[in-house]
Amino acid sequence: MRAKGIQVLCGKANACHAWMRMICLAGILIFCSQIALSAQRSKRSVPYRDSFNKKKFWSLAALGSGIYGAATIGLNAAWYQETGRSSFHFFNDWGEWRKMDKLGHSYTAYFEAELCFKGARWAKMPNKGATWTGVAAAFVMQTTVEMRDAYSTRWGFSPWDMGFNLAGIGIFAFQQLHWKEQRMRLKLSSSLDSYPTTAIRSANGLVDSRLVDRSNELFGTAISERLLKDYNAQTVWLSVNPKSFFPTSRIPPWLNLAVGYSAENLYGGFSNTWTELGQFFKLSEDKYPRYSQWLLSPDIDLSRIPTRSKVLKTALTILNIFKIPAPAFEYSRAKLSWRWLYL
């Protein structure tokens, strides 16, 4: 990341971070759960304590411990052992990936906190205790990755990453404690378009490369990899539910309005330059400009769709971390355009 040749490693590191977060998602309820359990035993929560389901709670705790431990060990063996270790140090990555990675941190922390909250509520914790359980779990999960970066010779502790982690957690916690519901949600969408196969000549004109090869190296080839890693394909959304702010209106309770942010032509963390086969490549800024996109689009809050089926409700809750494809206004490069279907 400090040199052009390390930008590929940067992409791979982001991939490992993303996979770890997804793998651990089902298991991070265990962290700081003792705090929530203590809250259950306080005098204020005595009436609720009788409904607390210890069997469910400790089942989640055991599962979470196993998944988190295995994922942490696996990530360390697969990635961090290869990068080398150093003393704790900082790294400024503010200018990387046009902030898409930063919004990814907020998004991940947000849905980790909410899903852990859901699990705690399933174990019959009160709203406040379950909220702080989700907050603590997401914080520990994200901080684990940040601290590993802090001792890596190729990266370092990023205050920006940590700040956006806290922002995502804060968005969840404020709403749950203040409104006892999520009126604004962070969501993700991804459009897996094909990359160009035309030849790109190295700086000295001796070797050819292709953007499809560069993208495969950075973002992977499998659909699951690209959904998690491809910053050119991803859009992070803030999806707002108007009905919750205007309860007497005739707006459908499931209809949301979402503001999105995305970026295009990202073929490196800081710039569109890389090395391949010992040759240096640099994309033309005129032909491949790195730019941001702002979007406005309707959305559906799947958690507000009424159903009596617990299985369906759980499925809708999980799918609610993604934004549905819909028409959108796009503002980019000082122009406003209309997209009939934005994925």
Image (cartoon, rainbow, N blue to C red):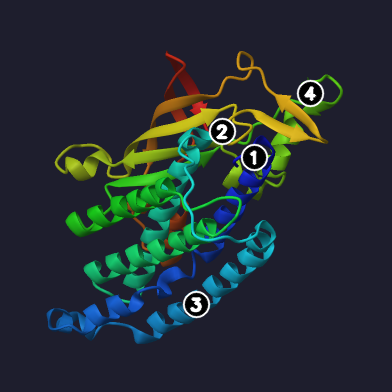
What distance separates the C-alpha of mark 1 from that of mark 3? 33 Å
Label 4 belongs to which residue?
202
Whether 289 is drawn above or below 38: the answer is: above
Q: In the image shown, does 319 or 223 lie closer to the viewer?
A: 223
Residue 205: percent from left, percent from top = 83, 19
N-terminal-most mark, 3 or 2: 3
Residue 138: percent from left, percent from top = 40, 62
Please identify the quarter of the rendering in which residue 309 is found. bottom left
Label 1 belongs to which residue?
7
> Mark 3 or mark 2, which is nearer to you?
2
Label 3 belongs to which residue?
65
Left or right: 176, with 191 as reference point? left
Q: Look at the numbered discs 3 and 4 and tell me whether their residues touch, using CB distance below 8 Å.
A: no
Whether 267 is drawn above or below 16: the answer is: above
Q: Amino acid at mark 4?
A: Ser
What distance separates the C-alpha of mark 3 from that of mark 2? 37 Å
N-terminal-most mark, 4 or 2: 4
Residue 32: percent from left, percent from top = 35, 74
What distance separates the C-alpha of mark 1 from that of mark 4? 17 Å
Q: Amino acid at mark 2?
A: Phe
N-terminal-most mark, 3 or 4: 3
